[in-house]
């Protein structure tokens, strides 16, 4: 069994090299046929990374809907632009199915946001925040978990950008994909110790 430090400071993270995934592919999905192709590949996996992005609201009382759903295998991340196509039944069925496992972080928030756009019963989800303590890590944020396990820093510079933009910038695409890929990497690293 590995022994991981339970916590890490921001100063320690800032000394680490920035995480990049030059060997992985990003696919932006804006149509039902593209989504069907993505789901065929995703359904061949035992587990996939999961995350969502929502356009930030800087006005009190304004609540935006989910703009992007990220689903990733270890090698490709599908950025599903639900702000363009809505949440089709094939996507809500995927999210309600027990397999593959969908690995994410702070999933309650994602469910709450998604349920504004569609009705589904989340199934087959694993929240890293609920299992990470089993390997001795007390940090609950993705950036800190990843830094402890892999010694690399995840950039958060794109977090508050416009996820409903007509086109996602390469920086937005990489940020969104990294969040889903990092969940897969963390789960693969710790799953045998759970």
Image: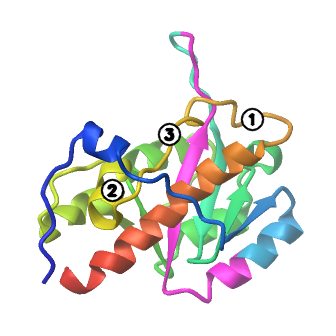
As measured in the structure, the alpha-carbon distance from the residue carrying label 2 to the one carrying label 3 is 13 Å
Label 3 to label 1, Cα distance in Å?
18 Å
- Residues in magenta? 39-59
Q: Which residue is mark 3?
A: 156
Which mark is first along the chain, 1 or 2? 2
Horizontal relation, residue 164 to residue 161: left or right:
right
For discs 2 and 1, the disc positioned in front in the rendered view = 2
User: Does the residue at mark 3 contact the one at mark 1 (Cβ under 8 Å)?
Assistant: no
Q: Secondary structure at mark 1?
A: loop
Horizontal arrangement in the rendering, residue 58 relative to residue 131 (left or right): right
Whether label 2 touches label 3, CB < 8 Å: no
Q: Per the image, is 40 magenta?
A: yes
* Residue labelled with disc 2: 147
Which is nearer the eye, 72 or 150? 150
Instruction: Pinpoint residue 73: horizontal percent, then vertical percent.
Output: 59, 76
Lateral position of residue 127 relative to residue 48, left or right: left
């Amino acid at each position: 069994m590995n022994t991981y430090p339970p916590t890490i400071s921001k100063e320690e993270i800032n000394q680490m090299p920035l995480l990049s995934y030059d060997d992985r592919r990003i696919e932006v999905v804006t149509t039902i046929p593209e989504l069907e192709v993505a789901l065929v590949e995703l359904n061949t996996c035992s587990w996939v990374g999961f995350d969502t992005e929502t356009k930030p609201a800087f006005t009190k009382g304004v609540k935006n809907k989910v703009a992007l759903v990220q689903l990733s295998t270890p090698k490709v991340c599908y950025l599903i632009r639900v702000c363009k196509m809505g949440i089709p039944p094939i996507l809500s069925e995927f999210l309600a199915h027990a397999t593959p496992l969908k690995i994410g972080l702070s999933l309650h928030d994602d469910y709450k946001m998604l349920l504004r756009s569609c009705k589904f019963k989340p199934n087959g989800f694993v929240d890293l925040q609920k299992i990470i303590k089993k390997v001795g890590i007390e940090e609950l944020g993705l950036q800190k978990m990843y830094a402890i396990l892999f010694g690399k820093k995840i950039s958060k510079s794109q977090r508050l950008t416009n996820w409903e933009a007509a086109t996602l910038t390469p920086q937005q695409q990489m940020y969104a994909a990294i969040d889903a890929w990092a969940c897969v990497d963390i789960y693969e690293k710790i799953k045998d110790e759970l």
